[in-house]
Image: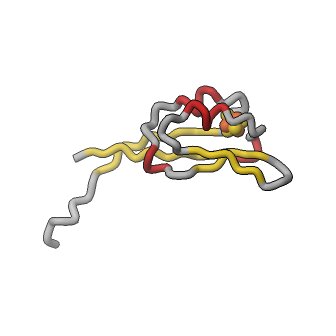
Amino acid sequence: MEMKKIEVELFTFNCIGCGKCVSHCKQGVLKMVDNGMCRFVNVVDETRCLGDGLCENICPKKAIKITRNQTSATNDFCFK
Ligand code: SF4
């Protein structure tokens, strides 16, 4: 059985903290972080990502990359 593994890669140094990606993601994958000096995006839970790429496409600074990999699922129930 094939499964999709979706990875959310952030290039935080490019992020200008506009929050567009967070407001477009209905899955709650991303959140904004404010450390008192700057505001930037971070990942809350990558496993929620559907891989639709809305955040990647809306980002004006190309600070997000979504990678969709096909992986083979392991079967933990098999005897070895
Ligand atoms: S859309 Fe891009 S620049 Fe704006 S907060 Fe998200 S990652 Fe940062």
Of 54 and 68, nearer the camera is 54
Quadrant for residue 18, please give it.
top right
Percent across and percent down for residue 75 are: 21, 60
Q: Nearer the viewer, residue 31 or 58?
A: 31
Quarter of the image with the C terminus in it: bottom left
Among all residues in the image, which is located at the extreme right?
37
Which corner quadrant of the image does residue 78 belong to? bottom left
Picture residue at 64% right of the left edge, 49% below the top = 42
> Seen in the image, is 30 located left or right of residue 68?
right
Query: How has the structure been colored for display?
Result: secondary structure
Q: Nearer the viewer, residue 15 or 71?
A: 15
| Residue 25, position as x, y percentages in the image | 54, 35
In the displayed structure, does residue 34 sit left or right of residue 2? right
- For ligand 1, the image quadrant comes to top right
Residue 28 in percent (x, y) is at: 52, 43
Left or right: 36 in relation to 24? right
Q: How many marks?
A: 0
User: In screen coordinates, is 73 left or right of 28?
Assistant: left
Residue found farthest to the bottom: 80
At 50% from the left edge and 35% from the top edge, which residue is drawn? 26
Instruction: Identify the residue at horizontal 58%, vertical 44% (top origin).
Output: 30
